[in-house]
Image (cartoon, rainbow, N blue to C red):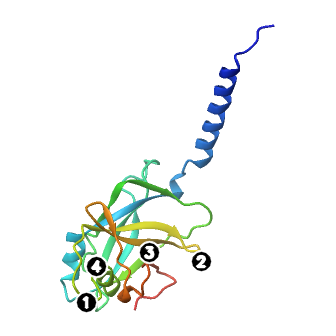
Amino acid sequence: MKKHDPRFIKLFYLAVIAGSLLFMTSCKQATKFAQVKYTAAQVNHWLDSAKTDNFIFQFYTPNADDPKHPYQLVSYVIDTAGNYLNALHPDTLGIAKDTTICLTGKAVLGNTYLTKKAIIAIISTDSGKKRDYDYLTFTPKIMASNQHVVYAIGLVKNDMPIDYRDADTGNGDIDSNPSPPAKLP
């Protein structure tokens, strides 16, 4: 009887284990999300308007037929009277690098929002001075309390995160709010 090379057997088992792990951890379309970015030019355009009140974010995919493409976001801007300022042409938030996040477990997909006040708190210092930034990042996560997919908001300059936590953000991070069940202020 021919004896098998022990190195070959070890390599074979390692390949089987690695393949199994890749198969078990691969994303399905319904759970694949991109970390997205909202550029300073896009955000500042809306913040410069006295009419802007809230930003509503809705899930978006440029190609539903491509299961490899993660969900992104589009942004609708609402004025103080409750009207959409960009209903026909929402801002599309681009993918931040090649970041794909796979969420697992129960997840409720719906609109999320940020107030103009929250965005100003992120991009400004306590003294009201506007921070120099390139874009806001939106990183998806599932809220433990109600399983809604919301987004942790980050601030970036030159591909480096900026710590925006200060008194006007309650010294903490800011997340988007699910809507529903949250009501717009």
Spatial CA span between label 4 and label 2: 28 Å
Looking at the picture, how far across and down is residue 30, in whole percent? 53, 57
Looking at the picture, how far across and down is residue 161, in whole percent? 34, 66
Query: Do the numbered discs 1 and 2 sit on residues whose CB atoms are within 8 Å?
Result: no
Observer-nearest of 11 and 85? 11
Q: Amino acid at mark 2?
A: Asn
Looking at the picture, how far across and down is residue 100, in whole percent? 44, 54
Spatial CA span between label 1 and label 2: 35 Å
Spatial CA span between label 4 and label 3: 22 Å
Earlier-in-chain disc, 4 versus 2: 4
Q: Residue at x 36, y 77 (%)?
A: 56
Q: Residues within 10 Å of mark 4 (few under 14, many from 20)?
A: many
Earlier-in-chain disc, 3 versus 2: 3
> Mark on residue 171?
none
Identify residue for label 4.
123
> Mark on residue 127?
1
Q: Residue at x 68, y 27 (%)?
A: 10
Observer-nearest of 173 and 89? 173
Q: Amino acid at mark 1?
A: Ser
Spatial CA span between label 3 and label 2: 14 Å
> Mark on residue 146?
2
Foreground: disc 1 or disc 2? 1
Q: Residue at x 35, y 88 (%)?
A: 168
Q: Residues within 10 Å of mark 3 (few under 14, many from 20)?
A: many
Foreground: disc 3 or disc 2? 2
Earlier-in-chain disc, 1 versus 2: 1
Identify residue for label 3.
111
Helix, strand or loop status at disc 2: loop
